[in-house]
Image (cartoon, grey):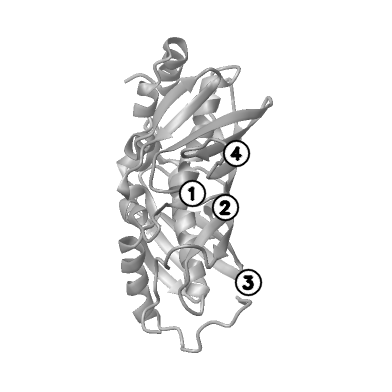
Amino acid sequence: MSSLRDILEAARRTGDWRPMTEAVPYARWMGVSLEPQGGEMICHLPFQPMLVGNSTIPALHGGTVGGLLESAAVFQLLYAAESIVLPKIINVTVDYLRSARAVDTYATGVITKQGRRVISVRAIAWQEDRNRPVAAANAHFLVDPGD
Amino acid sequence: MSIGRRMSDRPFDKERVLPLLDQGFRKMVPYNDALGLTAIDCAPGMCVLKLPWAEHLVGNSETGVLHGGVITSLLDACGGASVFLALPSPIPIATLDLRIDYLKMASPRRDVIARTECYKLGRNVAFVRGVAYHDTPDDPIASCAATFMLSTKGKPVVTRGGS
């Protein structure tokens, strides 16, 4: 089996990111697919009934949306960081802006700071309208380009 | 632990509340059920949940360590449950924000426990803090601080039964 680093190098070279989601069991289980567009890695989370938190509305679980934002931050970093790095998350803050309904959700990130040891990523998640995000997150990662 | 608003006058009966919480929060919250969460302890404003390790919840297939998003989901679910356990009667709530600090790597192939407390219940907002750990809360994998809006849309997802 190829190492994650090999899979990442191949994805960055070929633009085929499917093997990368396959290598992350949680992303595969959630049904996340990666759709690179320009400089952005769009994470697409198709709706499934198991993702629901409050079944009386119904609305997606806070953990579903938080997990998607965290994945979006990681995948943006894997996609667009200056060098090939495997990030280690330090922390994440998620703001829940609107109730996330029982439909498909999208998320992407922007690298706000790329330091020698820390990379910061801001991520947003939306459903029908990108200008009306359902949640936003800020995450910090430790990186060690030498490993 | 002090809580801003008075809770139910009835004495807290853990033998009655814990099974109701455990069944209710999986039945009414599909994602809690999908993750296999179980409630293992509770007190007024305090909840302890267990997340069983599973292959499909892993973030890095090389290490077998759970994905950060899974820990986020566990702490969010536990935080929400601790708010329900602080409320005098069930009302719908929604997470407003959630911060997680990852303090050390989770060990591969091991269950994770979350313990959260609602330490302040306001009129509109409930404040929660907690940790995720393997063996003891004194040696946490992650810590969290979260706020929940009270009386949001929909119906409460967990009831305390009776009242």
Q: Amino acid at mark 3?
A: Gly
Which sits in the foreground, A23 or B133? A23
Taking the spot 38% from the left edge, 77% from the top edge, the residue there is: B17
Circles 1 and 4 on the same chain:
no
Mark 2 or mark 3, earlier in chain: 2
Q: Amino acid at mark 1?
A: Thr
Marks 1/2 in contact by CB < 8 Å: the verdict is yes
What percent of the width, then of the height, locates residue A64?
43, 46
Circles 2 and 3 on the same chain:
yes
Q: For numbered disc 1, what is the local secondary structure? A: helix
Q: Where is the N terminus of chain A found, in terms of image quarters?
A: top left
Foreground: disc 3 or disc 1: 3
Circles 3 and 4 on the same chain:
no
Of all chains, the one bearing label 2 is B
In the picture of the structure, the residue carrying the numbered disc 3 is: B122
What percent of the width, then of the height, locates residue B123?
62, 72
Q: For numbered disc 2, what is the local secondary structure? A: strand
Taking the spot 58% from the left edge, 42% from the top edge, the residue there is: A136
Mark identifier at residue B72: 1
Marks 3/1 in contact by CB < 8 Å: the verdict is no
Q: For numbered disc 3, what is the local secondary structure? A: loop
Q: Inspect this view and state whether residue B39 appears.
A: yes
